[in-house]
Amino acid sequence: MYKHDYLLDKSTVLPYALSMSEPTSSSKAYQMPESDASNPSLSMPGGCELEPSATAPVSSSRPRKSPKPKGLNLATLVNRYGTSEKCRELLCRVRWPNGAHCPRCNDSAVELETDKQLFYCKRCDYQFTVTAGTIFNDSHLPLEKWFMATLLLCEAKKGISAHQIHRTLGISYKTAWYLCHRIRAAMKEAAKPKLTGTVEMDETYVGGRNIGQGHAAKHDNKEIVIGIRQRNGDLRLFHANDVKAGTLAQYIRENVKADVDVIITDDFASYPYAAKLAGVPHKSINHSGRVYVMGEIHTNTVENAFSLLKRGIMGTWHRISPKHLASYLEEMEFRFNRRKRADLFIDTLRHMVTAPVLTFQKLTKESAA
Ligand SMILES: [Zn+2]
């Protein structure tokens, strides 16, 4: 068995998955065996991969140059999750690690109707599937294609366009566009830990029609992106309205702990006052004097993230409507902060079965707004 074998072997698959493959019974009450329920490590085999310190911040004390762990590749994905049944089994385990629950009344005494892959809640007389009330809601696209698109989005360091997904998976462009937006919406995280230690902050300008150097080229028609990155830690990206000191101070307050060691920026005029307003220690590097590194004082790690973002915007998405920039930034941030995790794909699926539903109407309304 592989080290990162997410499917695990048959004996370790949770009971509903077992009852799914049991040909003799058509309807089976699903209940977690007591021994399993009392021992989470038994009920969630390979727990280290399926539950990788979900509560702890991913960031701190990460070694600088650790080799990238081997996650899933497309060939393995197709091999393991090549059918809707197999995809459903995995979604069940990711969505309900302690056994299926009714999404309506939260009762755990649900039955699995094997043939239709439907769950039934006796208490509130409700039939549901593992994808009910999730971002997969009302999708006619086979789950295998959802899984492939998700992996492609996870694995593409610089992002992947809806056009590419449309060509690679042989689905219509409209379907691909909606699919990408839904996966991206699932990557949006509600609660993010505040950054601490040594934190770099910088601003950059993306999009617009003017390319080149200089003040005018920098600002005309362009959107402002603020990047904040904990050294050896997480990245935060924001689409900002302006770079006034008050605005920057707000981003610091919302994303950086008050007891941060230091915030390092370039010598852009707003930062000293922003740091003062936010009440955090501040050091700057004199970029206008062509000084880029002074010992530990530099903004290189946040700039590395910016260069990835820019290559993504130029090379992959070509043009991003300002309305959607924030969600592209969320996607980039999500992937960047998990780039060293072998369970990136599983973690994305976990977000997809817990994120709020994004309907086509809502998305197109936002696009038109
Ligand atoms: Zn119910």
Image (cartoon, helix red, strand yellow):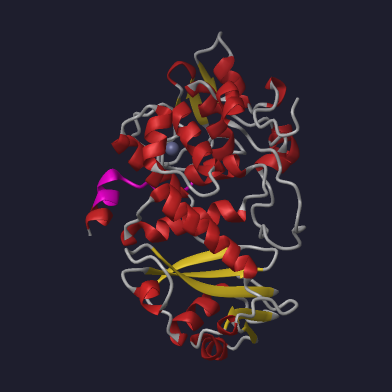
What is the x, y in percent for residue 337? 60, 56
Which residue is depicted at the point 48% across and 23% down?
84
Residue 207 occupies quadrant = bottom left
User: Which of these two is toward me, 160 or 120?
Assistant: 160
Residue 128 visible to an observer of this rendering:
no
Residue 236 occupies quadrant = bottom right
Image quadrant, ligand 1: top left
Which residue is depicted at the point 63% across and 69% down?
300
What is the x, y in percent for residue 133? 40, 41
User: Which of these two is toward me, 291 or 353?
Assistant: 291
Q: Magenta stretch containing residue 361, yes or no?
A: yes
User: Which of these two is toward me, 253 or 91?
Assistant: 253
Position of 310 relative to 364 (above/below) = below
What is the x, y in percent for residue 152? 51, 38
Residue 74 occupies quadrant = top right
User: Which of these two is toward me, 290 or 188?
Assistant: 290
In the picture, which quadrant includes the C terminus? bottom left
Q: Is residue 361 left or right of residue 26?
A: left
What is the x, y in percent for residue 176? 36, 37
In the picture, which quadrant includes the N terminus? top right
Highlighted range, magenta:
354-364
Q: Is residue 219 left or right of residue 333?
A: left
Q: Is residue 164 left or right of residue 85?
A: left
